[in-house]
Amino acid sequence: MTRIAGVDIPNNKRIVIGLTYIYGIGLPTARKILQELQIDENKRVYDLSQEDLKKIYAYIEKHVPVEGQVRQKVFMSIKRLQDIKCYRGLRHKAGMPVRGQHTRKNARTRKGKSIAVGGTSRKEIKK
């Protein structure tokens, strides 16, 4: 396994896909990095020379915010929204969907597992 920016990249993947394992680098950014460094994006990670890996590592270190930097930026953005008590910040704080989704039937990913309301059963309601 090759290690770039603190992330293990599988050797059998193409380098353009392998770079997307790093948090903060998606497919367009990976393609841009390889185009700037003039490395074929169809090469497998195990086919790269040490020189190519050093070039990729140096470029990412210098030009692309990754891993901790990106996570910290996202966390600080959400924290700012919560501090100013805007609608989006309140939704983040409450663990509800932020971007206008309905919550009556869906939103299980954000809200968590559904909790049954106790005290009555179906039979008691019909009586």
Image (spheres, grey):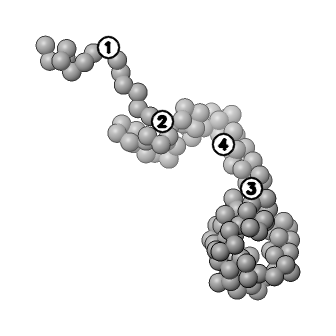
What residue would you read off at disc 3? 67
First in sequence: mark 1 or mark 4?
A: 4
Q: In the picture shown, does residue 53 fall above or below 77?
A: below
Please state which amino acid type lies under the numbered disc 2: Gly
- Determine the image quadrant of residue 19: bottom right
Judged from the image, the secondary structure of the residue bearing numbered disc 2 is loop
Work out how far the residue at label 1 is from the one at label 4, CA to CA, in angstroms: 38 Å
Q: Residue at position x 54%, y 35% from top?
A: 95
Distance of mark 2 from mark 3, alpha carbons?
26 Å
Q: Earlier in the sequence, mark 2 or mark 4?
A: 4
Quick one: label 2 or label 1, which is nearer the N terminus? 2
Front residue (pair 120, 29): 120
Looking at the image, is 38 positioned above or below residue 28? below
Number of other residues with Cα within 10 Å of mark 4, as a class: few under 14, some 14 to 19, many 20 or more:
some
The type of residue carrying mark 3 is Glu
Mark earlier in primary sequence (4, 3): 3
| Residue on which disc 2 sits | 112
The 10 Å Cα crowd at callout 1, few under 14, some 14 to 19, many 20 or more, is few
Comparing labels 2 and 4, the label whose residue is closer to the camera: 2
Read off the residue under disc 1.
119
The amino acid on which the numbered mark 4 sits, given as a three-letter code, is Ile
The answer to which of 114 and 71 lies nearer the viewer is: 114
Helix, strand or loop for disc 4:
helix
From the image, tell me which residue sits under label 4. Answer: 78
Disc 1 element: loop
Tell me the amino acid under the disc marked 1.
Gly
